[in-house]
Image (cartoon, helix red, strand yellow):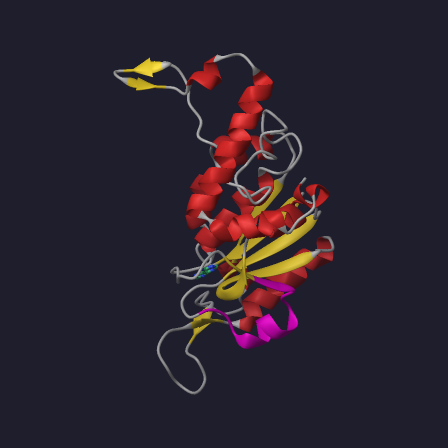
Amino acid sequence: MRVDVITCVPFLLESPLQHSILQRAQEKGIVTIAIHDLRDFTNDKHRQVDDYPFGGGPGMLLKIEPIVNCLRHLQKERTYEEIIYLTPEGETFNQKIANYLSGCQNIILLCGHYKGVDQRVRDHFITRELSIGDYVLSGGELAAMVVIDAVIRLLPGVLGDETSALLDSHQDYLLEPPMYTRPAVFENLKVPEILLSGNFAQIDAWRDEQAWLKTQARRPDLVTKFEGISPTDAS
Ligand code: ADE
């Protein structure tokens, strides 16, 4: 898979890509993540990529010209299934969208900054708008990182144990059961007996029940979704 990210603050994206799972995924050649600095695509002699909105009002907007120059440059090399603009006005990102994006070959993520981008970019060049939640960030960069992380960890070979992404909270609309590790007793705090029993059928049944109870207590909206899907939808 290839992910191209367009931003006017490339440094914001550097560190998270250089560690842990995202770093390993790139080293293994499973994903290529390329960051593009919008300032490299402007004809402005001061390399300015933003300007005041027509009609007045506070804040600056990213200009159409460098964005379209960058998109055309990338599209000359390959075809993209999605050109995504990160904005709090977009569709809320979730596991289902992450699953779908992990099946794409090439995607572009465009990060807004300041007051966002010229509307003509959104109307004519963007295929999809995504939000990571109902709050406003200073720019789309952190949101792009959230999307990248959620998508890349789903690619085959990225996680050590291939099944572990399937057991994640939200993958089947249920939260994860409580998990414990050694020691079995810390001060007077004990791990549930069942987990030490070696009876894996009973452990699975206990975990299913705990996942169910936790989801009912914390996210009853997800229980409704889980009940509404068939076992094949959940896999
Ligand atoms: N840019 C600013 N806030 C955002 C959000 N909540 N989601 C995606 N992009 C954003």
Q: Tell me the quadrant of the picture where the N terminus can be found.
A: top right
> On screen, 172 above or below 112?
above
**Residue 12, position as x, y percentages in the image:** 42, 49
> On screen, 172 above or below 137?
above
**Residue 145, position as x, y percentages in the image:** 49, 48
The quadrant in which residue 72 appears is: bottom right
Give the image quadrant in which the ligand numbered 1 is located: bottom left
Q: Is residue 173 magenta?
A: no
> On screen, 36 above or below 63?
above
Q: Is residue 162 visible?
A: yes
Left or right: 116 with respect to 31? left
**Residue 19, position as x, y percentages in the image:** 47, 33
For the residue pair 222 and 61, the one nearer the viewer reads as 222
Q: Residue furthest left?
A: 187
Q: Is residue 176 visible?
A: no
Q: Residue furthest bottom?
A: 55
Residue drawn 60% across the image and 60% down it: 84
Q: Tell me the quadrant of the picture where the C terminus can be found.
A: top right
For the residue pair 142 and 184, the one nearer the viewer reads as 184
Q: Is residue 118 magenta?
A: yes
Count the labels in the image: 0
Residue drawn 58% across the image and 51% down it: 225
Residue drawn 58% across the image and 17% down it: 200
**Residue 169, position as x, y percentages in the image:** 52, 39
**Residue stretch rendered in magenta on the structure:** 116-129
For the residue pair 65 and 19, the one nearer the viewer reads as 19
